[in-house]
Structures are given as structure tokens and as C-alpha cells.
Image (cartoon, rainbow, N blue to C red):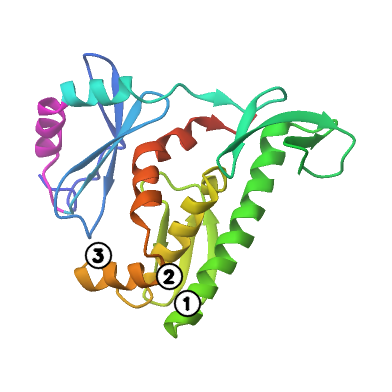
Amino acid sequence: MIFRRRPLPAAIALDAPPVVVRLRVDARARRFTLRPTAGGGAVLTLPEGVPERDARDFLERHAGWLTGALSRIPALVTVSPGLCLPLDGVPAEIVVARVTAPRLEAGRLLVPEGRAAGPALQAFLKRRARDRLGAAARGHAETLGRRVAAVSIRDTRSRWGSCSSTGRLSFSWRIAMAPEEVQGYLAAHEAAHLVEMNHSARYWAVLAGLMPDYERPRAWLKREGRTLHRYRFDV
């Protein structure tokens, strides 16, 4: 039984403790990748053509690891007035005010009266991320003698950014909550892929040319990035 002949199940449930693992087939994957997600679930990425029983065996072998990893993920937080939401890495209290659109003022995030704070701030962060990362990436591309075809903003969980062979860049809008240095690193990281579509030594040399001290913000993203997924903006 392979997935090409039988549809891949949407998820596999582990019994102890109860965890729902969503399955994702990636033609580029060469091995299993198990990633815990906020809310107590997980995503298992696997190559095409792998038997379903192999996916189940892998999950059973790594059930203990997954339980530990899930226990370290911060609890979900609903974005609402009174919450301190990080913006550029600095906490800003969400305050309802007589404004027409969210804005940062005197260290506070002002949100319009009569509107749900979460969706309004999500739109605000999307615009901020698109403007900042788009401009930074295009600047780096010019330095490299390349061109950015387009910039899109998404809410991806498996990666913070991507670059296609056609020069289209994509970023997670949640990066707008990270320190400015981290945002700058992500823009440089994806722009460097316009030259090298890989993570070879040549790629890291290109990135170092754009941002010599990239290791520090890269380490922050690896260490703290998952905390940015704890915030719920849908209510």
C-alpha cells in the first residue's frame, strides 16, 4: 500500500497521550520530519510513496519525544485589549481608542473601537511585514544584481520565508513581532536565495556578504520563533 494508490489519511491519532498528527506529503522531502504545533497537535512531513504503516511506526517510535516537545510549547494566547503583544520584539499594550486603524503610539498598540482587536491587528502586522521585508529584500536583491518578482505574506508554520526559482519571495507576517534585526535577517536570507537556491557553502557566503553578523538573529529565530505562533488573531 502506497499513497499514490490509496489516499493519504488526513491525520493519525496517537493514543497515549492523545495527539492528532496531520500528515503532509512533500515531493522534495527525503526523510520524515515531525513538527509539534501550538494547540497540542503535530505535523508529520514525509516523502512521496512511503507506506502508511511506516508513518505509523515512525510516530510510535517518537511518541515520547513528541510528548516532551509539546510540553515545551507555550500555551495559546488570544489577542485582545489589555494584552502586551510584541512588535519589533518590544511588548506593546493593546488599547482600544478612537482611531480608524491600528497604530503604534507611545509604546501602545491602539485599536479601533467597535472592532475585534485580533483581526484588526493581524491586518496591521501583515501590512507592516509586507512593507518592511519587501523593501529590505528588494534592497538586498539590488546589491546582488538580482530582481524580486513579487512578495507575498502568509501565515506559514513550517518556514518563515521562501524564494522560488522565478524570484517570488514569501514571508510569514508573524515575523513583524520579532526584533527588527531578525526581520532584517529573514529578508537577507531569502534575498540570498536569488543567487543560490540551496543552503550550500556558497549560499552562506552570499548571505554573509549581505549580513556579516547573521548568526545572532538566526539563533534568535531558531530559539524564540515558535513563541510567535502562540498568538491567536482570529477572535
Q: How many marks?
A: 3
The location of residue 38, given as percent across then percent down, is 41, 29
| Residue 193 appears in the figure | no
Which residue is located at x 63 percent, y 61 percent?
131
| Residue 191's disc number | 2
* Highlighted magenta segment, given as a residue range: 49-62
Q: CA distance from mark 1 to mark 3?
A: 17 Å
Determine whether, in the image, residue 64 is placed left or right of residue 108: left
93, above or below 173, in the image? above
Which residue is located at x 37 percent, y 71 percent?
192
* Membership of 199 in magenta stretch: no
Q: Nearer the viewer, residue 20 or 119?
A: 119
| Residue 199's disc number | 3
Q: Earlier in the sequence, mark 3 or mark 2?
A: 2
- Amino acid type, callout 1: Ala
Determine whether label 3 and label 2 are within 8 Å by CB: no
